[in-house]
Image (cartoon, rainbow, N blue to C red):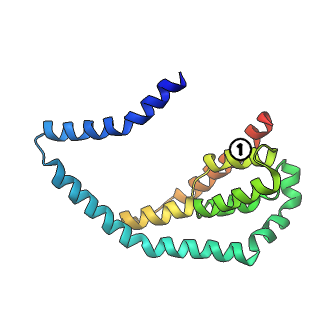
């Protein structure tokens, strides 16, 4: 069964690409020109959002290097203990909302200190897949799409992050 799934995963991307090209040819469109136009639009989008990306990464780096994240984790240590998770996860929750790559650095620190198979390690692993880079995603996509009225997006995104954190804690508790 594993071999079958491995073979499927090896061929799925080429099959999808050939399917898209075949559909384009069947619709009598110039697939190559459309691809080049889309790639050019994507490149212009990357250039437009680059300052936002750099700003977010610098801010996360400053917070991490300054020791602010450890301070925040210490401030919430009592509350996190009562809720059943390590205070080491508090900085991870905060940073994950801004940068997944910076959060990955924190994950490695947590794994080094607690181990990947510990309750904290399991919670960390699940949390990384159950939460989203809220502020990064909003800033990048809203900037790219020129969205100015975000309405309830932030509240919904923060609520979904809270749901992901709670689910991570509950699931890790059930597994560990």
Residue 51 x, y percent position in the rendering? 45, 76
Q: Is 140 left, or right, of 170 in this rendering?
A: left
> What residue is at 73 percent from the left and 63 percent from the top?
91
> What residue is at 19 percent from the left and 53 percent from the top?
34
Q: Is 61 left, or right, of 27 in this rendering?
A: right
> What residue is at 38 percent from the left and 67 percent from the top?
46
Residue 35 x, y percent position in the rendering? 23, 53
Residue 95 falls in image quadrant: bottom right
Report the number of numbered marks.
1
Visible residue check, residue 33: yes
Visible residue check, residue 149: no
> What residue is at 70 percent from the left and 61 percent from the top?
106
Name the image quarter holding the C terminus. Answer: top right
Judged from this view, the residue extending furthest toward the left is 28
Tell me the SS state at disc 1. helix
Give the answer, above or below, for where 4 lies relative to 81.
above
Dot 1 alpha-carbon crowd within 10 angstroms: few under 14, some 14 to 19, many 20 or more = many
Judged from this view, the residue extending furthest toward the top is 1
Residue 101 x, y percent position in the rendering? 59, 61
Front residue of 84/12: it is 12
Q: For mark 1, what is the residue?
A: 168
Residue 70 x, y percent position in the rendering? 79, 69
Q: Is 9 left, or right, of 15 in this rendering?
A: right
Give the answer, above or below, for where 152 lies relative to 15.
below
């Amino acid at each position: 069964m594993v071999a079958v799934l491995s073979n499927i995963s090896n061929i799925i991307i080429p099959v999808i690409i050939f399917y898209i090209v075949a559909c384009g040819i069947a619709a009598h469109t110039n697939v190559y020109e459309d691809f080049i136009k889309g790639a050019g639009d994507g490149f212009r989008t990357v250039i437009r959002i680059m300052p936002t990306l750099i700003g977010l990464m610098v801010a996360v780096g400053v917070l991490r290097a300054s020791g602010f994240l450890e301070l925040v984790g210490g401030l919430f240590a009592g509350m996190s203990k009562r809720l059943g998770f390590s205070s080491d996860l508090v900085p991870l929750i905060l940073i994950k909302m801004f940068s997944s790559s910076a959060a990955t650095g924190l994950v490695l620190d947590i794994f080094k200190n607690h181990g990947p198979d510990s309750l904290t390690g399991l919670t960390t692993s699940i949390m990384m897949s159950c939460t989203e880079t809220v502020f990064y995603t909003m800033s990048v996509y809203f900037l790219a799409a020129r969205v100015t009225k975000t309405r309830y997006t932030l509240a919904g995104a923060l609520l979904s992050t809270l749901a992901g954190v709670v689910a991570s804690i509950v699931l890790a508790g059930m597994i560990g």
